[in-house]
């Protein structure tokens, strides 16, 4: 009876994972979907702790188990409550890395159990294969995610050397070769080979992410997320645990599909992202080498007049908005303009910010209605009939060089066609290049006016100016 109840717990967990993932595809239901999936996970965990049996014995060690859960819960809760929206991408990388670390540790523990239970020459091939897959993928995900976390918070700089991609390929081939040798020709040196694979996998994860930076980081985060899912699925195979397998497959598949969509949004192949190191170590020379001419500035009072008497306004949020924590002021500006009869919407580029969906999450925090967030294709159809586009901290995703300059590292990347609007106002702290490290041609076009300053203060002052009209 207990086995049937445990199976039911796993079934409920699997169904809630699928249902939660489905609900995450819509911003209006994403929060509820997340809670449903979390509830399913709690049921599966408690079912395993109290109902799982092996050899007629239950798990026991409840003090250790619940002590670990309590510590992890407190740390996770406090971290999530304190994190700023600008730091959300690195938190995602950190949590994702912890998932990879768990898969890595499971493989280590189970391999040690295996070598103590079987003679070295009789290790079961299937089990060793699954353990090694979990070890390699989990280690790469953990090490890569930690480097991504460091790069996103500025503690780790892009690093590359001549021939690094060749070095990475050789390193990967050595890892695969050692794994094949361990599976096909097990020996008394199995443990040494196993830990050599572990060390090399961690090293590969570090060098895999080191040269990648700039606008490619959302793709890397998504790819590493899929790695963690696959590693977790290996654990599900290892323990014959249906809910662990289902969760891992869902995360792996979702991460892979998201990676493909991110690459499509930049019009680049995954191989080009990983090998090209776009935005990190670019050979295009220092920003500003190209003669751009002069830009023009606009005052707050003129901006207030232009936006107040417009019929249609589009706001393009970017990382600068997140840095300034200006999403609430932005929403207040939107409501103020709508009270004056202005149609206000937001244009969201798929790779704006530092992770997939960064801008959507940011604006949702300020209670911006979901229907006002238009995807790139929809927004591009609307720009020709738009009176004013207000760009808040976005840079590379509105750079016309992606369409006009074959020498640009972002050439071919689909962008928001903001230059088609009648007026373009760009809010930035300075003329410093964006995350990809290149100059933006948009800033020097006749239609474009620069409004310098911190996004939050500028928006607050702009609101005050509009109210005084």
Image (cartoon, helix red, strand yellow):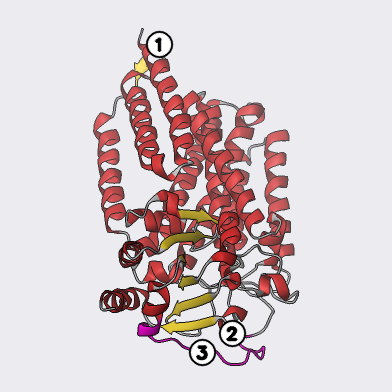
- Residue 74 shows in the view: yes
User: Residue 296: which numbered mark, if any?
Assistant: 3
Q: Residue placed at 73% from the left, 69% from the top?
A: 163
C-beta proximity under 8 Å, tags 2 and 3: no
Q: In the rendered image, which quarter contains the N terminus?
A: top left
Marks 1 and 2: which is nearer the front? 2
Chain-order first, disc 2 or disc 3: 3
Residue 1 within the segment the image draws in magenta: no
Camera-side residue of 214 and 395: 395
Residue 446: which disc?
A: 2
Residue bearing the label numbered 1: 4
Helix, strand or loop for disc 2: loop
Residue 301: say if magenta.
Answer: yes
Dominant SS in magenta: loop
Task: Find the magenta span and give its range.
Answer: 286-302
Which image quarter: residue 15?
top left
In the rendered view, does 282 fall on the left or right side of 228? right
Give the CA distance from mark 1 to mark 2: 71 Å
């Amino acid at each position: 009876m207990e086995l049937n109840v445990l199976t039911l717990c796993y079934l409920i967990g699997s169904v809630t994972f699928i249902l939660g993932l489905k609900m995450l595809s819509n911003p209006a239901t994403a929060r509820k979907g997340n809670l449903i999936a979390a509830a399913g996970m709690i049921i599966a965990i408690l079912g395993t702790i109290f109902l799982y049996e092996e050899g007629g014995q239950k798990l026991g060690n409840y003090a250790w188990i619940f002590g670990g859960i309590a510590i992890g819960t407190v740390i996770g809760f406090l971290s999530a409550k304190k994190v700023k929206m600008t730091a959300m991408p690195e938190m995602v990388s950190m949590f994702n890395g912890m998932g990879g670390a768990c898969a890595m540790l499971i493989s280590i523990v189970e391999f040690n159990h295996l070598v103590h239970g079987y003679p070295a020459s009789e290790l079961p091939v299937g089990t060793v294969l699954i353990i090694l897959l979990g070890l390699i993928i989990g280690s790469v995900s953990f090490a890569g995610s930690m480097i991504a976390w460091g790069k996103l918070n500025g503690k780790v700089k892009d690093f590359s050397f001549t021939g690094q991609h060749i070095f990475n390929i050789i390193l990967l081939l050595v890892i695969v070769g050692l794994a094949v040798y361990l599976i096909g020709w097990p020996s008394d040196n199995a443990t040494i080979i196993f830990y050599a694979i572990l060390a090399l996998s961690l090293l590969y994860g570090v060098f895999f992410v080191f040269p990648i930076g700039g606008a490619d980081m959302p793709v890397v985060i998504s790819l590493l997320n899929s790695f963690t899912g696959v590693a977790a699925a290996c654990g599900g195979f290892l323990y014959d645990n249906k809910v662990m397998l289902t969760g891992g497959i869902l995360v792996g598949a979702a991460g892979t599909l998201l990676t493909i969509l991110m690459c499509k949004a930049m019009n680049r192949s995954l191989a080009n992202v990983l090998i090209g190191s776009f935005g990190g170590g670019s050979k295009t020379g220092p920003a500003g080498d190209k003669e751009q001419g002069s830009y023009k500035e606009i005052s707050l009072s003129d901006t207030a007049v232009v936006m107040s008497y417009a019929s249609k306004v589009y706001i393009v949020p970017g990382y600068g908005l997140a840095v300034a924590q200006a999403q609430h002021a932005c929403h207040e500006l939107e409501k103020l303009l709508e009270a004056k009869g202005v149609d206000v919407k937001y244009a969201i580029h798929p790779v704006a910010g530092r992770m997939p969906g960064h801008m959507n999450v940011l604006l949702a925090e300020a209670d911006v209605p979901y229907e006002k967030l238009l995807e790139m294709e929809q927004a591009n159809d609307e720009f020709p009939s738009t009176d004013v586009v207000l760009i808040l901290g976005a840079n590379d995703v509105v750079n016309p060089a992606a369409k006009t300059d074959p020498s640009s590292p972002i050439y071919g990347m689909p962008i928001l066609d903001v230059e088609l609007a009648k007026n373009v106002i760009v809010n930035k702290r300075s003329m410093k290049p964006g995350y990809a490290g290149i100059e933006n041609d948009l800033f020097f076009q006749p239609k474009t006016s620069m409004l310098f300053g911190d996004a939050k203060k500028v928006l607050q002052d702009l609101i005050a100016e509009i109210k005084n009209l």
